[in-house]
Amino acid sequence: MTKRLTTIKDIAKALGISVATVSRAMRDTYDVSAETRKMVLDTAAKMNYRPNFNATGLVRSGTHKIAVIIPAITNYYFSTVITGIQEYALEQNYQVMLYLTNDSAYWETKVVRELSLSSVDGLLACITYETTDFSHFEELVEADMPLVFFDRVPESVRTSVVVQDDYTGACTATEHLIAQGYSKIAHLAGPRGLNLTQQRLQGYLDTLKKHNLESYGVIHSGFSDENGREDMAALFNSSSKPDAIFSVNDRKAFGVILWLREHGIRVGEEVGVIGFTNDPTSKIISPSLSTIAEPAYGIGRKSCEVLIRHIQKQSYPTQEISLPTELIVRESTRRKGIGKD
Amino acid sequence: MTKRLTTIKDIAKALGISVATVSRAMRDTYDVSAETRKMVLDTAAKMNYRPNFNATGLVRSGTHKIAVIIPAITNYYFSTVITGIQEYALEQNYQVMLYLTNDSAYWETKVVRELSLSSVDGLLACITYETTDFSHFEELVEADMPLVFFDRVPESVRTSVVVQDDYTGACTATEHLIAQGYSKIAHLAGPRGLNLTQQRLQGYLDTLKKHNLESYGVIHSGFSDENGREDMAALFNSSSKPDAIFSVNDRKAFGVILWLREHGIRVGEEVGVIGFTNDPTSKIISPSLSTIAEPAYGIGRKSCEVLIRHIQKQSYPTQEISLPTELIVRESTRRKGIGKD
DNA sequence: TCTGGTTTCGATAACGTTCTCGCTACTATT
DNA sequence: AATAGTAGCGAGAACGTTATCGAAACCAGA
């Protein structure tokens, strides 16, 4: 197919030495004299030598590759996580293979099952919201494949996980709404079965209870702005209308704001809205969206770091890492909505 | 490191047949009886066999992997392109390795140079806007490595390219502004040296000339909304203020709209704004942004398709593919700005 | 001069596949 | 019944690298 590449043998022949010496000279310096080492390195550069990872990977079982399995990348959170993963991986000389599941459990299973165990050293995964059966991941764990989950994590599989502190973030969001004077608070929750959905819901409920407030409704649905619109229509159809909305994520909150605007309801003044993520669009939408900022980049770096630890020390203990979130106040939760962002 | 995996040999031993037969049974049916084939497949499944890609890649030089080199993924366009690439690749049983250059020519060069030629079958690249020296790519071409550029393409390297029709898109955008009654049109251009910057600028200039209009300013800068704001400040500092802005992309146009709003200038009515991309935020921003929709997903699929063609037939002729764009009219270019989106 | 210890290097097996031969046993043809 | 042809399979080399073992060369000490 492609032109024949120069191998270690070619260098050996050119120099009249053995392949073993060339191989040694390539990486460590011990067991080989300084001059031969220099000679080898020079001619290697001259002949434009590149190591064949198939061969090295074959003999020492270990490719320097990690697989990332993620539902999608066309949103701020996921794309930023990947960026963090990618940067840390490259720093550590690991390469990233990307697999998109498109939030389909079928594809997730297929991808994980077909993923040859020999082609990657470890796996970084964020499950789809459809996934209920985790046997495809359990098989990997049983084969001792290092595996780390981030953001959306299953409860059953016993591995390391890296998440943001969803529970505390939800508490902070709800506290903020209450502090701003809202009392009839509803929650637009994520899909059922997802850990983060449960955590954020619980934070919301616990904070309400702490303040002796009733929930003004909880609706479970997807993560899109369309879902947000639909949920608002359902919510305002009932007799007891909320005066504030805590959305499980920003995109859904965008739908909420758009719906409120279209229905002539003043965002902030009449109905407060807070999201979760800190998507860049939350600064652009009008009114701008208050939100709980997630450390997406940090999640990416950290989960990659944990994975590589697992790869390099097979006895590295299982970690459960939770990164802090941060409240960002903007216009959508200002009662007297005059100030700018 | 990870537990010993079952190999083809284990299957052969378990069945009392040779490895060659097992190997053959695994892929094509010819030269092996239906019953042995079934036997092999069954026990392979039973023993949880996964092929070792290092070994297959070694003997038949060809890994089923392609590398994607891209400045970033944290924006709509790039993440959608990657999604297209990924989906087509998976359909064709190729795996995607992701490399982010962060728009740094240094990292681009480093990544491309360190990319072992033996570890991927081909390369899909979108250059940084810093890159001026393309020798790292030319080396690949000389080594017969299949290489396809998309979106941002160098002019010098002789390979296949897949882009949207930037020139015609820019013409359409400018025509639209003129048709809406704007006549003092300025262009916020992209970084110099990028082909798409040049194409969009030229489309703008040619359309103005066709209508006997003067340009009300061209400013080159980056792609961010911050850049858009800065450029607007510079533009409105002069005595001859434009009544319409054609921005090289949507994110920059968001900055424009934000700047106009902050300065009490009515978007659409007083100053028309049109972008390029069709970022989902363009529907969310208020007023919503008219734009030229780019076929991002299609670009991804198509460039991956061309690359795989090149990989599978080394004599596949070099292609220059240009995908059509589409005008999307929203509020930011409505003179009497009452209508909804 | 002999011994023992380093340093530097070469031969060779191994990693898990695929590929090229060639062999056997069976079927078809005359 | 003899021959040719074919289907099915096995033996072994090959891919490019690393790892193991041992050999050669050199040096120091007695």
Image (cartoon, coloured by chain):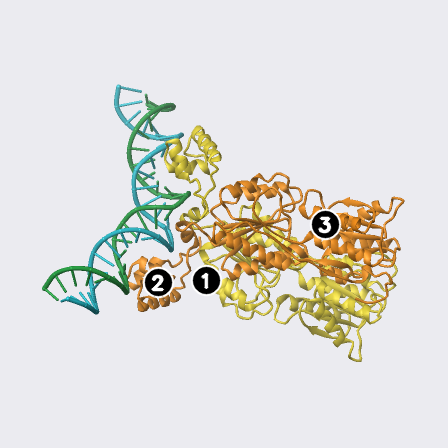
Chain colours: A orange, B yellow, C green, D cyan
Could you say which disc has been placed on residue A200 in the image? 3
- In the rendered image, which quarter contains the C terminus of chain A? bottom right
Q: Residues within 10 Å of mark 1 (few under 14, many from 20)?
A: few
Mark 1 vs mark 2: give the one in front: 2
Of A104 and C29, which appears nearest the observer? A104
Quick one: which residue is furthest to the bottom in this view? B239
Mark 2 sits on what residue?
A: A25
Q: Are marks 1 and 3 on the same chain?
A: no
Q: The disc labelled 1 sits on which kind of residue?
A: Glu
In the visual, does B47 lie left or right of A299?
A: left
Q: The disc labelled 2 sits on which kind of residue?
A: Ala
- Tag 3 secondary structure: helix
Q: Are marks 2 and 3 in contact (CB under 8 Å)?
A: no
On screen, residue A142 above or below A15: above
On screen, residue A331 above or below A144: below
Q: Could you tell me which residue is drawn at 80 percent across and 76 percent down?
A: B241
- Tag 2 secondary structure: helix
**Disc 2/disc 3 C-alpha distance (Å):** 55 Å
